[in-house]
Amino acid sequence: MEITWVKSQDYNLFELLSDGEFHSGELIAENFGITRSRVWSLINSLENKGVLISRVRGKGYKYNGGSKLLDVPKISDALSGLQVNYIVECSSTNDMARDEAENQIKPLLAVSEYQSGGRGRRGRAWASDFAHNLTFTYMIPNFYTENGLEGLSLVVGYSIARTLSEKFNVGVGVKWPNDIFINQLKLAGVLVEVQGDITGSYNLMIGIGLNVNKLPKLDDRIDVQSLNRVLGKAIDRSALLIAIIKNLMEDIDTFSRLGFVEFKSKWNDLDVFSNQEVQVQQGDRTVVGISRGVDSSGALILEHNGCNTLVHGGEVSLRKVYG
Ligand code: BTN
């Protein structure tokens, strides 16, 4: 078992409160060997990170949101061959993985309960509340494929969608290039970054954010969803993370050997914008057309005035044209 494990007082407090019972400030202070005012500031810190805590005079503090901390030994046992680095709070798991990449021989899973500077695509932030969702990076050192990188992020999106469908029997879709949708709302996003020479071998960081047990408190978008709201129950995040990584390893292996062509029709079957009018934003340029799915390299086929154009990944955004 290879785990690098960094815990914190936030971790200990959440662990205590996640039994769903009331705990008095006095007893918490005594157990942790800290002052009552330190307990108060730790409670505030968890609340600021999105944890909903009930406070009742004379009884103390209680959390009954149903989410549990990640079970790191279970994750590591189930994913043999993978180094697991767990930090309760970090800036971004992609950065955490990148910092380790040069010394890493085998794939690494960098996972945290909370990111203070989570990053999304196109310079956006990625918000996720403490111990409720999944924020992790699967890093492959010295990755090389003759097929190039195009299509990889689509494979990641497909892999997550198929895992969710297999595990929960729900209809999950993909949106080009790498969003995961459920009931027309965004459930997860993927941020693929590389370190090194992309014409040769490089360290590949696949960062994934998935709303599992709570809609992010700080997310200002209305078009987002979380799994627990769809399924009506709290989800075991550790079991879900294990299932995602197992399928991801399998799908990336297929992609490296055979290329995106192996995934083209499977991806197109899950495409939420298939045959709909969409708007593609590439820098200052906006193109409107009918989305006709992806070709065998993973490029988006956009039909405009009867002609097809291919849109390649990068800093591109796609949205549906309404009305
Ligand atoms: C997006 O949809 O814009 C991509 C979101 C990617 C978020 C994940 S969370 C884990 C990893 N660390 C980050 O800072 N970002 C990615």
Image (cartoon, rainbow, N blue to C red):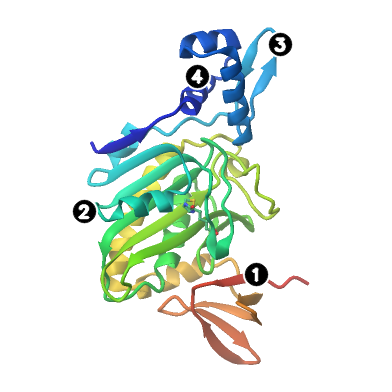
- Find disc 1 in the rendering and name its residue: 319
**253 up-or-down from 305: above or below:** above
Decide: few, some or many residues near mark 1? Use Cα within 10 Å; few <14, some 14-19, many ≥20. some
**45 up-or-down from 105: above or below:** above
Rendering coords of residue 307 (x, y %): 59, 92
- Screen quadrant of the N terminus: top left
Q: Is residue 15 left or right of residue 221?
A: left
Can you tell which quarter of the image residue 27 is in?
top right
Question: Which element type, helix, strand or loop, lies under badge 1?
Answer: strand
Mark 1 or mark 4, which is nearer to you?
4
**Cα gap from disc 1 to disc 4, whole angstroms:** 43 Å
Who's the residue at 56% across and 44% down the image?
Answer: 128
Sequence-wise, which precedes: disc 1 or disc 2? 2
- Give the camera-side residue of 58 and 265: 58
Q: Which mark is residue 57?
A: 3
Decide: few, some or many residues near mark 4? Use Cα within 10 Å; few <14, some 14-19, many ≥20. some
Can you tell which quarter of the image residue 226 is in?
top right
Q: Which mark is residue 16?
A: 4
Rendering coords of residue 100 (x, y %): 31, 50
- Find disc 2 in the rendering and name its residue: 105
